[in-house]
Image: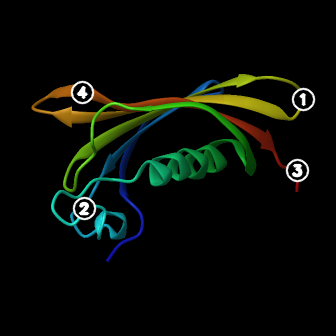
Amino acid sequence: MRRFAEKTETLEANDESLHVTLDLPADLIWFQGHFPVCALLPGVVQLQWVLDYATRWLGPVKLREVPSTKFVRPIRPGETLQLSITKERVNDTDLSLRFEYRVIEQGHSVQASLGRLKVTQVTR
């Protein structure tokens, strides 16, 4: 069983935004038992992946607050996702990260979830 999605391609990374495409294998551990009849990716995992990719992009960050999240459509095993993160600087150490997950369906992308995280950049 795998714990992480397969990163297939980084579409774009610059000072303001990051876009990543993720393939979700059916044996991803997060689908096990959530839910037995109809597996879906838990919201807490989606938020953690935003933090994980933000850390790869910006360096270490610490979650301060989750001001908003909206889960629009379930994310299921075997699907391909596009994750987009944009940042807005609040002050010298704090950032607001807006994120959106979109599922690729028959050549089109459909919004699955979106939200905003407030983080602090951690200096080493």
Q: Which amino acid does label 4 sit on?
A: Ser
Give the class, few, some or many, for how many residues have Cα within 10 Å of label 2's Cα (few <14, many ≥20).
some
Mark 2 and mark 1: span between their CA atoms? 39 Å
Earlier sequence position, callout 2 versus callout 4 = 2
Q: Residue 109 carries which label?
A: 4
Residue occupied by mark 2: 25
Mark number displayed over residue 38: none
Residue 18 or 78: which is nearer the viewer? 78
Amino acid residing under circle 3: Thr
Residue 103, x across and y down, in percent:
26, 36
Query: CA–CA distance between discs 4 and 1?
Result: 35 Å
Please name the residue shown 24% across and 27% down the image: 109
Give the position of the N terminus as an image quadrant: bottom left
The residue where tag 3 is placed is 123
On the image, numbered disc 1 is attached to which residue?
A: 92
- Which secondary structure, mark 2? loop
Image x and y of residue 69, in percent: 51, 32
- Spatial distance from mark 3 to mark 4, Cα to Cα? 36 Å
